[in-house]
Image: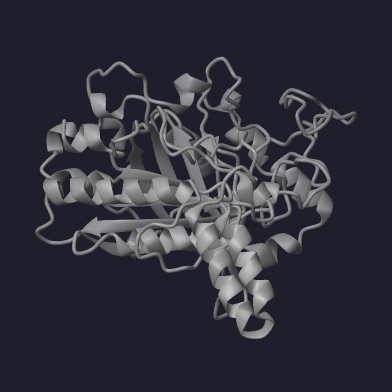
């Protein structure tokens, strides 16, 4: 079922099982009424799902879902390492299982031996995205297929990285607009690993729920700032070139990555107690945008292009020299750009009482050495926002293109 279809036109196996289960439980009290409800469900005529639950994202396609898909309300990021002795053949079998399960879940279907976590729910914009880390290629005997763009990220001045929560052989990104649907996918995929892969790290995130605002709006981060205004957009003339690997292979660019992308993943803790003590005026100067509506301090509305040369009446720059939007702007980085698709996170409180919270930063680009790296180096040199951030985990993954029906993600790499 696609998002354009009538959500009441069919019932998924997951919803049917849930409806039948609910009717059975109610039958202990209501008898015949529950039986009538179960019969109605069996005829494929349940109460229609809401728009949030009914929306499905196709699994198959030229590119994997979860890159240009609109941000979902719930996310899980999880990395695995190949188990000792697991080879290329075992990895191929795992990706085949993962792809089959992801296809079923994204269509709102319950896989075999389902846990029942998401019974009654529709697909809820679920996406599952798979990637390969640099260390995967040596373990799988595929060193000759390692892309140049998957080189280790350089050290940055702001790094305080935890090696146990960084990198990994295999990566999965899960997003959905329902928390149980997202966790159901995480659990189902983890159960499929068998003896092939072992969990390395896992992170949970969230965003604003669709429909929580009176109109569609750019999301806010935990600092209260509108985050993502200047993201490249699919309508941009150079969007494909910036975000996706060209279809034609080249030196250091193997054919299996055609149409794929690279994901930089960073766990960035925000020093919220320090940030919240700043005045509103100071917060806006640090970012370079108004907090209320995201408009640049150079004037206009949220979507007005930032004018880095704009001066105030006193002759000072409207957007300060170390303001975040100035330092991170493509114009300040020789055109470097990336598609940021983050989740916020909150993992409780630290020993000093400060929230362990911030951003699960995910940036997509055709080449991280031309996208993320130059921008982060520039931020290292002088960004007012940096003193309120701590980069605590980091990873880089090669995310291949999508697959056709009957194929699995990564097949061109593992069977090429």
For residue 383, say whether it is visible: yes
For residue 155, say whether it is visible: no
Which residue is at the front of the view, 161 or 143? Answer: 143
Compared with 16, 61 (above or below) is: above
> Going 50% across and 64% down the picture, which residue do you hit?
17
Which residue is at the front of the view, 239 or 95? Answer: 95
Compared with 344, 372 (above or below) is: above
Image coordinates of residue 350 in percent, x first then y, are: 55, 76
Which residue is at the front of the view, 206 or 361? Answer: 206
Q: Quadrant of the image for the N terminus?
A: top right
> Going 46% across and 36% down the picture, which residue do you hit?
364
Image coordinates of residue 106 in percent, x first then y, are: 47, 47
Q: Is residue 58 left or right of residue 132?
A: right
Q: Quadrant of the image for the C terminus?
A: top left
**Colour setup of the view:** one colour
Compared with 115, 75 (above or below) is: above
In the picture, residue 25 is in which quadrant? Answer: bottom right
Q: Number of labelled discs?
A: 0
Image coordinates of residue 409 in percent, x first then y, are: 31, 39
Q: Is residue 10 left or right of residue 277?
A: left
Image coordinates of residue 139 in percent, x first then y, are: 14, 49
Q: Is residue 243 left or right of residue 178?
A: left
């Amino acid at each position: 079922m696609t998002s354009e279809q009538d959500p009441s036109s069919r019932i998924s196996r997951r919803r049917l099982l849930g409806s039948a289960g609910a009717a059975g439980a109610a039958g202990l009290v209501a008898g015949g009424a529950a039986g009538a409800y179960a019969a109605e469900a069996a005829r494929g005529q349940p109460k229609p799902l809401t728009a949030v639950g009914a929306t499905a994202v196709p699994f198959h396609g030229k590119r994997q879902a979860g890159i240009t898909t609109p941000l979902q309300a719930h996310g899980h990021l999880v990395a695995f390492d190949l188990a000792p002795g697991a080879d290329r053949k075992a990895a191929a079998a795992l990706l085949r299982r993962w792809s089959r399960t992801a296809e079923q879940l994204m269509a709102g279907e319950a896989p075999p031996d389902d846990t029942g976590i998401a019974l009654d729910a529709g697909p809820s914009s679920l996406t599952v995205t798979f990637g390969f880390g640099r260390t995967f290629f040596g373990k799988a005997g595929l060193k000759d297929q390692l892309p140049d763009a998957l080189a280790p990220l350089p050290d940055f001045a702001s790094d305080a990285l935890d090696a146990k929560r960084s990198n990994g052989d295999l990566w999965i990104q899960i997003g959905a607009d329902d928390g149980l649907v997202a966790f159901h996918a995480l659990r189902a995929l983890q159960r499929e690993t068998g003896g092939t892969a072992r969990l390395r790290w896992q992170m949970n995130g969230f965003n604003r729920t669709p429909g929580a605002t009176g109109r569609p709006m750019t999301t806010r981060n935990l600092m209260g700032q509108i985050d993502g205004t200047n993201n490249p957009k699919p309508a941009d003339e150079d969007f494909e070139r910036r975000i996706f690997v060209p279809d034609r292979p080249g030196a250091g660019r193997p054919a299996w990555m055609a149409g794929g992308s690279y994901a930089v993943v960073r766990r960035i803790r925000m020093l919220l107690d320090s940030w919240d003590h700043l005045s509103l005026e100071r917060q806006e100067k640090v970012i370079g945008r108004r907090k209320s509506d995201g408009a640049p301090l150079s004037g206009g509305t949220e979507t007005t292009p930032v004018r880095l040369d704009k001066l105030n009446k006193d002759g000072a720059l409207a957007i300060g020299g170390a303001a975040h939007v100035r330092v991170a702007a493509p114009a300040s980085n020789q055109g470097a750009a990336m598609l940021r698709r983050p989740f916020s996170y909150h993992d409780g409180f630290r020993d000093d009482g400060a929230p362990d919270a911030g951003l699960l930063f995910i940036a997509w680009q055709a080449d991280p050495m031309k996208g993320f790296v130059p921008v982060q180096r520039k931020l290292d040199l002088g960004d007012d926002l940096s003193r309120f951030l701590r980069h605590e985990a980091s990873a880089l993954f090669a995310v291949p293109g999508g697959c056709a029906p009957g194929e699995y993600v990564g097949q061109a790499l593992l069977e090429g």
